[in-house]
């Protein structure tokens, strides 16, 4: 049985917090380049150039891509044959977030109580999702989530009779209502199925799938493309100044659901959809 000490987890999470905030993922950079080639509106091209330059500066200077360095969302896949030693994995993850945000000069945005609003001053606690999988490795993905886009997200309990048309309308209406607020071009995570909370989780998880990887189900891969085309016809454009690049991708994740329900969640993310991962 493989043994992993919690100190390794802390060091890994610390580095991932910094890497995710400094280095924009290459799949998004590549989509920026493609979007610029396809844009016909001069202002939109200029804004894409600025966003790409911002990402270049962040990478070269090891500075945050955005001043909102997000609430740390951590996805942990734990092999069922691994043994964690030296303490609590949850404490280790939060210590990694604490150290990463301190050493990386990342903004601390977490308040200890949602009503009393007192800042924890170290960006903890993180939002942590665990998944037990076969094997003896631990895969950790850190996805800092800014709230300019998070606040634009929605969930709706559709009726089964609403079908695909109802899902499409809800997704497009959500993006239309968000307008320029989530700093487009955006990435749209869509969760369909499960229960109320499962749909929201699926929408969040959809955002960490590379945008050059489509859904493995051909039906949902086609739906992703259809929604992306319709969203980009809204004319919101980069930073809301118009153009055909309102979204860079629509990523859909699904799960079986109850015969009486059709839960749908839309988790919107800004152009700086950040995540970094490592395996131990």
Image (tube, grey):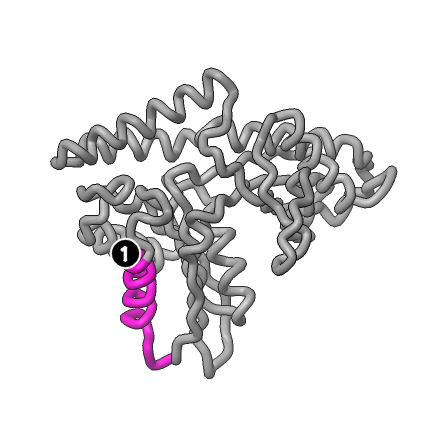
Q: In which quarter of the image is residue 115?
A: bottom right
Please name the residue shown 43% across and 58% down the image: 153
Q: What stretch is highlighted in magenta?
A: 160-177
- Give the class, few, some or many, for how many residues have Cα within 10 Å of label 1's Cα (few <14, many ≥20): many
**Depth check, front residue: 122 or 261:** 122
Residue furthest right as drawn = 86
Which quarter of the image is occupied by the C terminus?
A: top right
User: According to the image, label 1 marks what residue?
Assistant: 227
Q: Can residue 244 be seen in this view?
A: yes
Tell me the residue at 48%/48% (across/down).
Answer: 147
Residue 192 in the magenta stretch? The answer is: no
Quadrant of the image containing the N terminus: top right
| Residue 42 image point, x, y percent | 14, 32
Front-most of residues 277 and 149: 149
Looking at the image, which residue is at 80% across and 36% down?
6
Callout 1: helix, strand or loop? helix
Instruction: Please indicate whether residue 219 sits to the left or right of residue 114 in the image.
Output: left
In the rendered view, would you say 207 is above or below 103?
below
x and y percentages locating residue 63 in the rendered image: 50, 23
Q: Magenta includes 167?
A: yes
Magenta stretch: helix, strand or loop mostly: helix
Res 279 → quadrant = top right
Residue 77 showing in the rendered view? no
Q: In this view, does 236 lie above or below 271?
A: below
Q: How many numbered callouts?
A: 1
């Amino acid at each position: 049985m493989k043994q992993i000490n919690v100190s390794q987890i802390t060091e890994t999470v610390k580095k991932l917090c910094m890497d995710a905030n400094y280095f924009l993922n290459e799949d998004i950079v590549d989509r920026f380049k493609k979007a610029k080639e396809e844009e016909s509106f001069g202002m939109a091209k200029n804004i894409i150039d600025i966003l790409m330059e911002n990402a270049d500066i962040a990478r070269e200077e090891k500075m945050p891509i955005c001043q909102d360095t997000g609430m740390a969302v951590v996805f942990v896949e734990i092999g069922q044959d691994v043994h964690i030693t030296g303490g609590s994995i949850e404490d280790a993850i939060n210590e990694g977030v604490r150290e990463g945000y301190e050493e990386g000069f990342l903004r601390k945005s977490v308040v200890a109580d949602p009503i009393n609003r007192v800042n924890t001053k170290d960006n903890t606690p993180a939002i942590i999702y665990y998944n037990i999988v076969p094997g003896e490795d631990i895969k950790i993905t850190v996805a800092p989530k800014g709230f300019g886009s998070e606040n634009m997200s929605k969930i709706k309990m559709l009726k089964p009779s609403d079908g695909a048309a109802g899902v499409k309308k809800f997704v497009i209406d959500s993006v239309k209502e968000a307008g320029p607020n989530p700093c487009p071009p955006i990435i749209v995570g869509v969760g369909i199925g499960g229960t109320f909370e499962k749909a929201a989780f699926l929408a969040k998880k959809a955002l960490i799938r590379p945008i050059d990887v489509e859904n493995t189900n051909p039906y949902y891969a086609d739906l992703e493309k259809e929604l992306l085309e319709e969203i980009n016809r809204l004319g919101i454009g980069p930073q809301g100044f118009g153009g055909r690049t309102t979204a860079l991708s629509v990523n859909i994740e699904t799960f079986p659901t109850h015969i009486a329900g059709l839960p749908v969640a839309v988790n919107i993310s800004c152009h700086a959809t950040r995540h970094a991962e490592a395996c131990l």
